[in-house]
Amino acid sequence: MVLRISGVGLSHVGLVRSGNEDSGFVGPTCMLVADGVGGAAAGEVASATTAYIVSAMAMAHRADDPVLTLREAISLAQEQVASGVRRDPARAGMATTLTALLTDGSTFALAHVGDSRGYVFRDGDLVQVTRDHTFVQRLVDEGSLPPEEVREHPWRNVVLRSINGNPEETGDVGPISLAPGDRVLLVSDGVSDLVDPVRLEAILARNPDDEAAQLIVDEALAFGGRDNITCLLASIVEGGAAAADGMLLGAVRDPYNVVDAAAVSGRTA
């Protein structure tokens, strides 16, 4: 039995920001969201570079251990973000989140760093499978902040871990158990800050992937659209080998946002 990802993705600039610093990719073996950290210089470059590297390495290493591939991709992304700052000091401080799912056709791996989110919808229940790397989540973990106050906390978007050029930040990468019929939802915080998980669960329960993804984006816009909005929704399906391509979303669609596309070739031989 060969498993693959069958999904859709949408990215919207939102109603407040002038540009889209989110990047996304969805294909038969990989799906990911990368969100340029708000307030930092050149967030779109960090997110596009990271999304390009992870998706390119996913396509080039389709039969390899997905955990190892994601770890190598994060390492290269950190190198390239650092290189981008060296090339243009005005980019100092640029950073991005990353939440990515990868499969070799039988096993799955999940990589996460930052505050984009990953969920699995199974048997009518939506379960968050990532943990925010944020200041307010740390307060919750310490018992200093009630979970119900996170959404309104003034520091809710302070990210403690990211793809920012630091080689010591390797992200949280590990296997994840998925089976045919499971649905995977990856979103930037432009969705998760505004759309309650209960509402996400209700949308998924009543709608197929393409309609549900559009409804989730519409919901985030209806609640103010104060950030870029990216939503990827995919079902895990059985099937033969699919074309090793996919859909690019957001900032990564502009090749000028990628620091050095050729840097990937040395890691894919």
Image (cartoon, grey):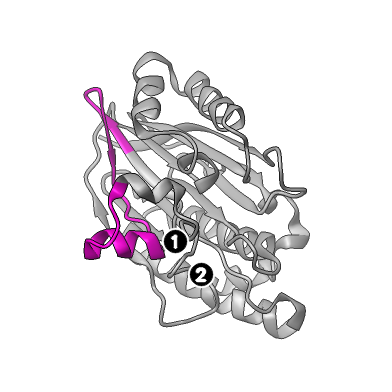
Work out how far the residue at label 1 is from the one at label 2, CA to CA, in angstroms.
8 Å
Q: Secondary structure at mark 2?
A: loop
Q: In front: 113, or 195?
A: 195
The residue drawn where x is 42% and y is 33% is: 234
Q: Secondary structure at mark 1?
A: loop
Disc 1 residue crowd, few under 14, some 14–19, many 20+, Cα 10 Å: many
Residue 123, position in %: x, y?
Answer: 21, 24
- Residue that badge 2 annotates: 163
The residue drawn where x is 57% and y is 57% is: 51
Circles 1 and 2, Cβ within 8 Å, touching? The answer is: yes
131 inside magenta stretch = yes
In the displayed structure, 253 sits above or below 241; it is: below
Name the disc covering residue 143, or none.
none
- Disc 2 residue type (three-letter): Ile
Residue 88 in view of the camera: no
- Residues rendered magenta in the picture: 120-147
- Disc 1 residue type (three-letter): Gly
Ranked by sequence position, the earlier of labels 1 and 2 is: 1
In the displayed structure, 240 sits above or below 192; it is: above
Residue 212, position in %: x, y?
Answer: 47, 22
Instruction: Give the quadrant of residue 205.
Output: top left
Q: In front: 60, or 140?
A: 140
Name the disc covering residue 114, or none.
1
Answer with left or right where residue 40 lies relative to residue 141: right
The residue drawn where x is 31% and y is 63% is: 139
233 inside magenta stretch = no
Residue 195, position in %: x, y?
Answer: 46, 34
The residue drawn where x is 41% and y is 76% is: 169
Disc 2 residue crowd, few under 14, some 14–19, many 20+, Cα 10 Å: many
